[in-house]
Amino acid sequence: MKKYKVAILSGDGIGPEIMKEAIKVLKTIEMISGVTFELEEADFGANAYFKLGHSFPEKTKYICINSDAILKGPVGLSYEETKKIPIEHQPERGAILPLRNFLNTYANIRPVYLSKYLSEFSPLKNEIIQDGIDFIIVRELLGGLYFGEKTLGINENGKRYVKETLEYDEDQIKQILIVAFKIAMKRKKVLHHIHKSNVLKSSVLWNEIIEELAEQYPEVEIKYQLVDSTATFLCLNPSMFDVMVMENMFGDILSDQGGGILGSLGLMPSACLGDKVSYYEPSHGSAPDIAGQNIANPYSMIGSVAMMLEYSFGMVKESRSIWDAIQKVLIDGFCTQDLFNLNENTTLVSTDVFGDKVVSILLDNK
Ligand code: IPM
Ligand code: MN
């Protein structure tokens, strides 16, 4: 019987309560599939800093690297609380970026997906959405401005000065493009490269490498779209995209726009894949203002379980059943407060009731 070790990084704010629902769903899959998941909790984020003096403690590193996959909740506290943490230990610089580096998770996969039955969640008009929304953002996660050399100081004219560098080498570009080509092969075989080659040399190199790699994927049609016009077309005609690949910063910005198109970042789970252990997380933040009230939306955290089953364990059927179940809860008219105002015909449910509904759909359909 198969057995997988899963590290659980519940994180801050609403993290623990949405993670509880994700674990409930994982336990249900365990029952249905017969696969065992051995869970190990580890401290991560702002709470870890206050408890242990480190937002990404050594013990957490050990647990992560010795697991088969990692489920990670959102991290970060309120602005006031975060200010109490030295800047290098704050969750973004002290935990998330080091986690990505440590695990070499260079590929961030963000599915922007909404069933046509839920189109009223989207701020876009029905004529634009038609058959729902369904595209995937493949974002490079370990390069570009995020990880380039940074200087902040005074220049020779005595002026305050900052320099941040955008660097990529061809291997880094190739490895993310290969991930994107493979995903495109499993879908509509159309791949958009989002770039800014009219200004940036880095985009020129990306375009060059994508052309070279294209020879290995002759079935995939490659399209080139400038990043600024992509922002426009995501609003005017999102269905022109199926798989989009782009460098780190472009992907950060456009994936949040993807959340906006869905109506909420609360509807976007994500996967961070690498050559060691991959981790899975909701794309949204830790919403400290509503933490502990049992009102947060666990959709993305539960969706992250679906992505883990598919990408780390090859459990495609079970993954699909979770996606179907989280969508069905919403289609049946149940949703948490964040989405409540977006649809008139809904019944408000709490975080744990949402999780219970997902579980009962999974059990009914097993
Ligand atoms: C994301 C987040 C992170 C990023 C932050 C929290 C470092 O915005 O995962 O998109 O910018 O990558
Ligand atoms: Mn972001």
Image (cartoon, rainbow, N blue to C red):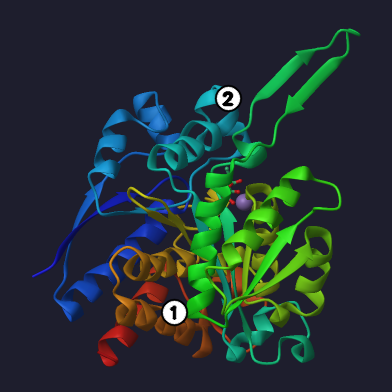
Q: Quadrant of residue 353?
A: bottom left
Q: Quadrant of residue 86?
A: top right
Q: Secondary structure at mark 2?
A: helix
Q: Is residue 96 left or right of residue 124?
A: left
Above or below 350: residue 46: above
Hey, what amino acid is under mark 2?
Ile
Above or below 176: residue 192: below
Q: Residue lying at the far left in this picture: please name it.
A: 1
The answer to whether marks 1 and 2 mark residues whose Cβ atoms lie closer than 8 Å is no
- Residue 100 seen in render: yes
Q: Nearer the viewer, residue 95 or 346?
A: 95
Residue at 56% from the left image edge and 65% from the top image edge = 266
Q: Position of residue 166 (x, y in %)?
A: 69, 37
Above or below 294: residue 222: below
Q: Is residue 93 left or right of residue 325?
A: right
- Whether disc 1's CB lies below 8 Å from ligand 1 is answered no
- Residue 296 seen in render: no
On the image, numbered disc 2 is attached to which residue?
87
**If the image is split into quadrants, where does the C terminus sit?**
bottom left
On the image, numbered disc 1 is attached to which residue?
326
